[in-house]
Amino acid sequence: MLEREPGRYLITQRAKTASLPLLWEFPGGRVNDGEEDVAALQRELRERLGLEVVVVAQAMATQHAYDSYVVDFRVFRCSLARPDQLVSHEKVNDHRWASLEEMSAFQFPGADAQTIAKLLDLEP
């Protein structure tokens, strides 16, 4: 979860041509063979959104079963390496900086929706 200011997290809207088109998600991506989770997250955010980030810690891990595959979903707390960075829309349709409570207004894929529900139940 990339936090720009306290309680405001980056969510991105999937491209019209992507699988699960136009749904909102926490930005991230796949881990390549031999790649560490943190390095994969930093690479994905740089490639997809043009952002350099500092990964602070893993916040949670969960699995979600879709019809034909299972996602091993890890959530990391991150911050922008430089606060003046802008989100590139080259590979996403849109983005928002939203609170966890505001995220209920957006439609997410199952794994992201499950993660939001778990995060809302966490004790501060």
Image: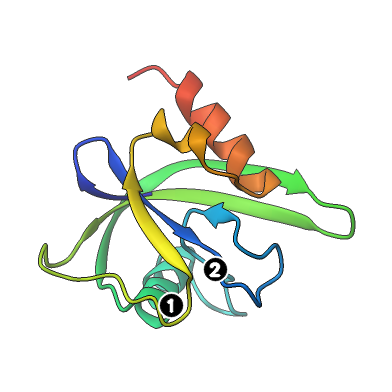
Residue 83 spot, x, y in % from top left: 11, 62
Please report the residue visible at 49 percent of the width from the left and 19 percent of the height from the top.
Answer: 121
Question: Which residue is denoted by mark 2 in the rendering?
Answer: 29
Q: Around disc 2, counting alpha carbons within 10 Å, would you say few (fewer than 14), some (14 to 19), or many (20 or more)?
A: some
Q: Is residue 81 above or below residue 104?
A: below
Residue type indicated by callout 2: Gly
Element assignment for label 1: helix
Residue 115 spot, x, y in % from top left: 56, 38
Horizontal arrangement in the rendering, residue 22 relative to residue 81 (left or right): right
Please report the residue visible at 45 percent of the width from the left and 22 percent of the height from the top.
Answer: 122
Position of the C terminus by quadrant: top left
Earlier in the chain: of badge 1 and badge 2, it is 2
Callout 1–callout 2 Cβ contact below 8 Å = yes
Q: Is residue 48 above or below residue 20?
A: below
Of 35 and 49, the residue lying toward us: 49
Please report the residue visible at 40 percent of the width from the left and 33 percent of the height from the top.
Answer: 102
Horizontal arrangement in the rendering, residue 36 relative to residue 54 (left or right): right
Please report the residue visible at 55 percent of the width from the left and 28 percent of the height from the top.
Answer: 118
Horizontal arrangement in the rendering, residue 64 relative to residue 97 (left or right): right
Horizontal arrangement in the rendering, residue 12 relative to residue 17 (left or right): left
Question: Which residue is denoted by mark 1 in the rendering?
Answer: 48
Nearer mark to the viewer, of 1 and 2: 1
Element assignment for label 2: loop
Q: CA distance from mark 1 to mark 2?
A: 9 Å
Of 82 and 90, the residue lying toward us: 90
Residue 85 spot, x, y in % from top left: 17, 70
Residue type indicated by callout 1: Arg
**How is the structure coloured here?**
rainbow
Residue 76 spot, x, y in % from top left: 41, 50
Q: Around disc 1, counting alpha carbons within 10 Å, would you say few (fewer than 14), some (14 to 19), or many (20 or more)?
A: some
Q: Is residue 38 above or below residue 56?
A: below
